[in-house]
Amino acid sequence: MNAAPAAVATAAVFIWLGMVLAISFLETPLKFRAPGVDIPIGLGIGRIVFRTLNRIEIALALVALATIAVGRPTGSVAALTAAILVILAGQLIAIRPQLNRRTDRVLTGQHPPRSSMHLYYVGLEAAKVLTLAALGICLLVAD
């Protein structure tokens, strides 16, 4: 892959990876342990944080995709890029709307039954972390 596009893509991928790790696996679980943060407050905060994270993820994905596309990627870089885009699309199109509807219900005082969608989202977050790390490493070593 060409050096300049690879450098930009590598930066975008590792920034994206750091944001997902910091928010999904650090901030999110810790906020519910803070004094005075109950489920509705935590969900309200989480909705704002994840909406912003997802917008930044889309921007970073577009930067990575554009620079990878013009940089003549290797097969592994192309495959990992496609995988990241599928994971992100799955989260944003298939899972987030369902989580948002459940959050709406909780925020209006309802007590909906537990949903497996949260587990699917976490599973995709873990897959995204691993795929972003693999993509970043492949970009670092790409010719």
Image (cartoon, rainbow, N blue to C red):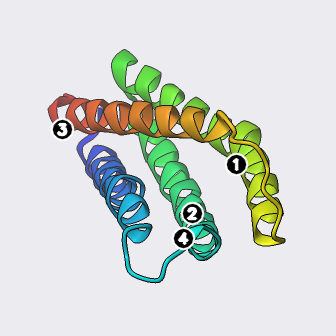
Q: Tell me whether the residue at label 3 lies in contact with that at label 4, contact meaning CB atoms closer than 8 angstroms.
A: no
Disc 4 element: helix
Which residue is tagged 3?
Answer: 140
Residue 96 disc label: 1
Lateral position of residue 51 relative to residue 27, left or right: right
Task: Identify the disc placed on residue 49.
Answer: 4
Which numbered disc flags the more N-terminal residue, 2 or 3? 2
In the rendered structure, which disc, 4 or 1, sits on the residue that comes first in sequence?
Answer: 4
Counting from the top left corner in percent of width and height, residue 61 is at: 51, 49
Most foreground residue, 114 or 16? 114
Q: Residue at x 79, y 50 (%)?
A: 112
Q: Which sits in the foreground, 55 or 120?
A: 120
- Between circles 3 and 4, the one closer to the viewer is 4
Q: Position of residue 58 (x, y in %)?
A: 58, 55
Drawn side of residue 91 relative to residue 3, left or right: right
Say which residue label 2 marks: 50
Place residue 48 in its image quadrant: bottom right
Q: Are marks 1 and 2 in contact (CB under 8 Å)?
A: yes
Near-viewer residue (93 or 120): 120
- Confirm or deny contact between disc 2 and disc 4 (CB under 8 A): yes
Residue 113 lies, with reference to residue 27, above or below; the image says: above
Comes first in the chain, label 1 or label 2: 2
